[in-house]
Amino acid sequence: MKRICLLGAAIAGILIIGVASALAAAPHAAKSGGKKSSGTKLSCKGNLILQVAPGATDVTPASETGSDAGPVSCKPFGKGFATLSYTTDAAGDLTGKWQEWFGTGSVYGTFDLTPSDNAPPTTSTSFSVQSFSGTFVIKSGTGAYAKATGKGTMSANSSDSVHFTLKASGKYSLPAAKS
């Protein structure tokens, strides 16, 4: 269960960063009377690290709740920074919220990741390989990305339950500028 939580958090972080980067790269939508465009493709990669819980003095990789943070890069949008918080549900899925920051605004949303391997879960005192796959949703944003929406798929992998490599792809839209 610990392994699932950590990998899920990492995957969410990548998706978050990818979405935010995509939004940052295309902050100006075409004029179309306020309607949203059909969507712009995004592809992101990130490297997140499990964060030490407030008041703790060490990393606990199998925790049922937690947060990850780190840098991400999205094609064609650039680089940013992401954070995510997660919980592990009764089925072992990682669910939570994410946010990414870029030079002209931020993007935020939710994610749901499912373990994608058959390896036994880690314990609170072990670090092991983990992998997750699932979906993300862009709920909105701030600054240049206000009212952004979108969705896509993501995956996260870790060889130690602390460092995660995330990949995400999907589409996002911004409201068109009013004419």
Image: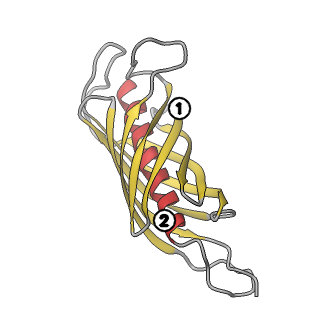
* Left or right of 51 in this view: 177: right
The spot of residue 15 in percent (x, y) is 45, 52
Number of marks in the rendered image: 2
In the depicted structure, whether residue 124 falls above or below residue 136: above
Please, which residue is most extreme toward the front here? 103
Q: Is residue 126 left or right of residue 34?
A: left
> Which residue lies at the image location 33% right of the left edge and 17% below the top edge?
123
Q: Label 2: state its secondary structure.
A: helix
State the residue at coordinates (58%, 57%).
138
Where's the C terminus, which quadrant?
bottom right
Closer to the camera, 42 or 142?
142
- Marks 1 and 2 in Cβ contact (< 8 Å): no
* Pointer 1 local density, CA inside 10 Å: few below 14, some 14–19, many at least 20: some
- As helix, strand or loop, the secondary structure at mark 1 comes to loop
Q: Which residue is mark 2?
A: 22
- Which quarter of the picture shows residue 165? top left
Q: Which residue is mark 1?
A: 89
